[in-house]
Image: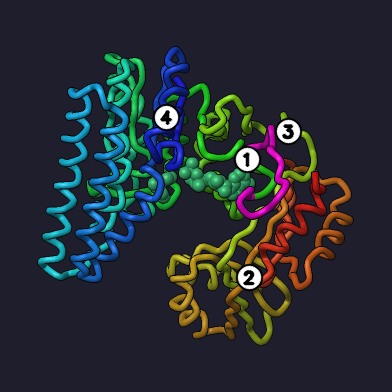
Amino acid sequence: MIVMKFGGTSVGSKEAIERTIGIVSGRLSDRPVVVVSAMSKVTDMLYALSDAIEAGDSAAADSALIALRQKHLEAAAELMPSDPLWREEAYSRINSILDTMQAFAKAQLACGAGMTSKEKAVINSKGEYLSSNMIYCYMNSIGIKTSWVDAREFMVTDNDYLQGIPDMAEIERRCPKVIDAAFARAQAVITQGFVCKTADGSEGVLGRGGSDYSASLIGMAIDAEKIEIWTDVDGVQSADPRRVTNTRRISRISFEEAAEMAAYGAKVLHPKTIEPAVAKNIPVLVLNSMNPEGQGTVILQSSFIEDGVRSVSSKEKLRVITISVPVLKDASSLLTRVFAVFAEARVKVDLVKVSPVDIMVTTDSVDYVPAAVAELEKFATVKVEDDLAQISVIGKNISELKIALKEASEQLRTSRLVSVAQNDTYVNISYVVPLATVRDDVQKIHTYLFGRE
Ligand code: ADP
Ligand code: ASP
Ligand code: MG
């Protein structure tokens, strides 16, 4: 079995879905488990719908629901113009999901109690149900015998409704049975990315961009031969091609380097995608559904990867928090105390630098920072700097590391080197730069490291 995950743009229109299912139809002998995202922009619309309901704005909620219904019904009509049976089936599934959403929105608006995160997850997860049902009908209409599976039968998490943490053991226990049963009567299986069921039995989601993570969890659970992440770029590139010119496709990259890139801002993969794949040593491929002949990127064990600089990634909207105490007598006890505060306030810390007088951390969990700062100020002096960004250069055994560091730093007008992490499998050199110059800075470093051609 293989897992084939298709992101929003790969299922974003009639043409995209036809192309995507064309790719799947050539792979039926591999027994594909197709994991789909919501059509592109749909999850954004759903988050906006949740906000509208929360704000009591029934006009905005109504128009969002109408737009969602129209988008999916139109796509279904275009996909199945001459198959009334499957087209009607698709209409009925789309309408039933939207009717439920409409009733839910109406009830929430009527009671005027806003939206808890549990209630938001009910709305935010519906994009994947809409797309997977519609594509299920389309696949069957063109003769691919396909089973539809509700990922909530096996994608179990903790009780965080909007950022569920998967229960790997439970997923491994449930998923193979569900998928095997679905294959008993079909050539392909389709299911949803992003969605999950929380431990208390509620509807949840894995967090934005989480469909990649779903695919990798399913791949791990069913011992897939490979996990294919089909997106809208020719594989993992040396930097974000939307922001940097002359990027290069990386043909092979290690699990560790890919995980570092994703954690340090490369949106092409959800940061947690790699973890389940590594657990079973399953290769992950990043491929372009707009260019299926392209070679994409293979992510595999570090021993197969040559040394060198692999990529430059960046994170915007970063905050730097510096925590100082008059005399840092015992760094470890201060660190323990500071990190307990961050954990409690749900501030996800990226980089840490400890000096004899202070601890500096970077974070992009902007919403939670004020609560953490109030707590830290009870025992330390705290400085918070906004409008910063982080640039990370990632590779493996970068020879001449010192020269690379010095020269890369010289490309930046104002920068602070915050960390150099190095082990057998990857090197990560990270800088903090002003938000105002980050785009220029990434381009400069990229041009310096990879040249213009
Ligand atoms: P999908 O909807 O298929 O999950 P995403 O938009 O989440 O697609 O991810 C693909 C996008 O990631 C690309 O269009 C690209 O702009 C961005 N991206 C950021 N960094 C990289 C990188 N290093 N290599 C490739 N793409 C990148
Ligand atoms: N549809 C979800 C999102 O847009 C999950 C995903 O596409 O990976 O965040
Ligand atoms: Mg994505």
Residue at (35%, 25%) from the top-left corner? 176
**Disc 1 from disc 3: Cα separation:** 15 Å
Which of the numbered marks, if any, corresponds to residue 305? Answer: 3
Q: How many marks?
A: 4
Residue 259 in picture, x, y percent from top left = 60, 45
Between 77 and 256, the one nearer to me in the picture: 77
Q: What residue is shown with label 4?
A: 221
Residue 242 in picture, x, y percent from top left = 61, 51
Asked if residue 244 is among those painted magenta in the image, a careful observer would answer yes
Q: Give the left or right position of residue 226, taking residue 164 as reference.
A: right
Q: How many residues crowd mark 1 within 10 Å: few (<14), some (14–19), many (20+)?
A: many
Disc 1 Cβ-to-ligand 1 distance below 8 Å: yes
For marks 2 and 4, the one nearer the N-term is 4
Between 44 and 408, the one nearer to me in the picture: 44
- Which residues make up the magenta segment? 240-255
Which quadrant is home to the N terminus? top left
Q: What residue is shown with label 2?
A: 435
Q: Is residue 218 above or below residue 337?
A: above
**Disc 2 from disc 3: Cα separation:** 33 Å
Amino acid type assigned to the residue bearing label 3 in the image = Ile
Q: Secondary structure at mark 4?
A: helix
Secondary structure mostly seen in magenta is loop
Q: What residue is shown with label 1?
A: 236
Amino acid type assigned to the residue bearing label 1 in the image = Val
Residue 120 in picture, x, y percent from top left = 27, 58
